[in-house]
Image (tube, rainbow, N blue to C red):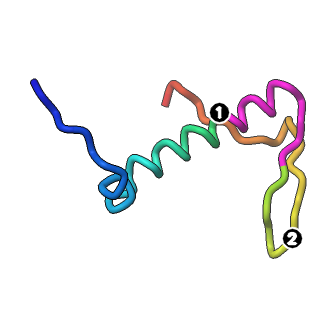
Amino acid sequence: MSKTKKNIDEYFYDGSEIDKALQRAVKEALLKHKIAGNPVASWKDGKVVWIQPEDIPVEDKNR
C-alpha cells in the first residue's frame, strides 16, 4: 500500500488534521497543568481569567 505524502498546501487547505493536532495539544497541556497544580489563563467576556487547577476541565478517556 503506497500513499503519497501531502504537501504543506494540502494540509492547510483541508485544515482538519491541523485542527485535530491542536485539540490534542490543548488537552495534553490542560492535563499537565492540572496534574502539576498550576492554573491556566483563559479569555472570558473580554477579560483574562485564571482557571484554578481543580477547575480545569479534562476529558474522560472512557467516553
Classify residue 50 as left or right of residue 61: right
The residue lying toward the viewer, choosing from 1 and 19, is: 1
Q: Secondary structure at mark 1?
A: helix
**The disc labelled 1 sits on which kind of residue?**
Glu
Classify residue 50 as left or right of residue 35: right
**Image point (89%, 35%), residue name:** 38
Mark sitting on residue 6: none
Spatial CA span between label 2 and label 1: 24 Å
The residue lying toward the viewer, choosing from 41 and 5, is: 5
* Chief SS of the magenta region: helix
On the image, the x and y values in percent for residue 23 come to: 55, 45
**Hey, which residue is sitting farthest bottom in the picture?**
46
**Image point (39%, 58%), residue name:** 12
On the image, the x and y values in percent for residue 15 come to: 39, 57
The residue that disc 1 covers is 28
Mark sitting on residue 47: 2
Mark 2: give few (<14), some (14-19) or many (20+) Cα within 10 Å. few
Determine if the magenta segment contains residue 37. Answer: yes
**Image point (88%, 59%), residue name:** 49
On the image, the x and y values in percent for residue 61 come to: 54, 27
Q: Secondary structure at mark 2?
A: strand
**Image point (39%, 47%), residue name:** 17
On the image, the x and y values in percent for residue 34 come to: 80, 31
**Quarter of the image holding residue 33?**
top right
**The disc labelled 2 sits on which kind of residue?**
Lys
Determine if the magenta segment contains residue 35. Answer: yes
- Quadrant in which the N terminus is drawn: top left
Report the span colored magenta: 29-40
Task: Give whichever of discs 2 and 1 has the lower sequence position.
Answer: 1
